[in-house]
């Protein structure tokens, strides 16, 4: 696997990890973006939305799009499949696997 693909997969994993840390498994895209950047995976809103859409298509997250001035805010909720992926119980193609419990 190429380093670029591994970086993308790791970034998606960090999204699931951030959501899994929340009691209700829910965060806004802004908070997720900040959390992922704080782990050393520098990214931008468009790339994050691509990752969130990818994860939604794989049933790992559900996205609610809320209107806000100048566009919309995405509210992201971790699904049961996403939680199992974050815990390392299932493998999702395109998402890095947990290597250490």
Image: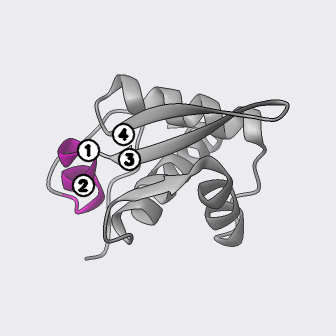
Rendered image: mark on residue 79: 1
Q: Residue at x 22, y 59 (%)?
A: 88
Mark 3 or mark 4, whichever is nearer to me: 3
Number of residues whose C-alpha sits closer than 10 Å to that of mark 3, classed few (under 14), some (14–19) or many (20 or more): many
- The segment highlighted magenta reads 79-88
Rendered image: mark on residue 77: 3
Q: Residue furthest top?
A: 57
To which residue does mark 2 refer? 83
Per the model, the C-alpha gap separating discs 3 and 2 is 10 Å
Rendered image: mark on residue 61: 4
Q: Earlier in the sequence, mark 3 or mark 2?
A: 3
Which type of secondary structure does the marked residue at label 2 adopt? helix
In x, y percent, where is residue 14?
50, 59
Number of residues whose C-alpha sits closer than 10 Å to that of mark 4, classed few (under 14), some (14–19) or many (20 or more): many
Q: Residue at x 41, y 63 (%)?
A: 17
In x, y percent, where is residue 4?
65, 40
Contact check, label 3 and label 4, Cβ < 8 Å:
yes
């Amino acid at each position: 696997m190429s380093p670029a693909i591994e970086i993308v997969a790791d970034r998606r994993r960090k999204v699931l990890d951030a959501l899994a840390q929340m009691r209700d498994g829910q965060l806004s895209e802004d908070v997720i973006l900040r959390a992922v950047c704080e782990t050393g995976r520098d990214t931008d809103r468009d790339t994050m939305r691509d990752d969130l859409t990818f994860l939604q298509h794989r049933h790992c997250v559900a996205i609610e799009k809320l209107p806000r001035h100048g566009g919309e805010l995405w509210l992201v909720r971790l699904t049961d499949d996403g939680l199992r992926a974050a815990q390392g119980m299932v493998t999702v193609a395109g998402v890095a696997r947990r290597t250490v419990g």
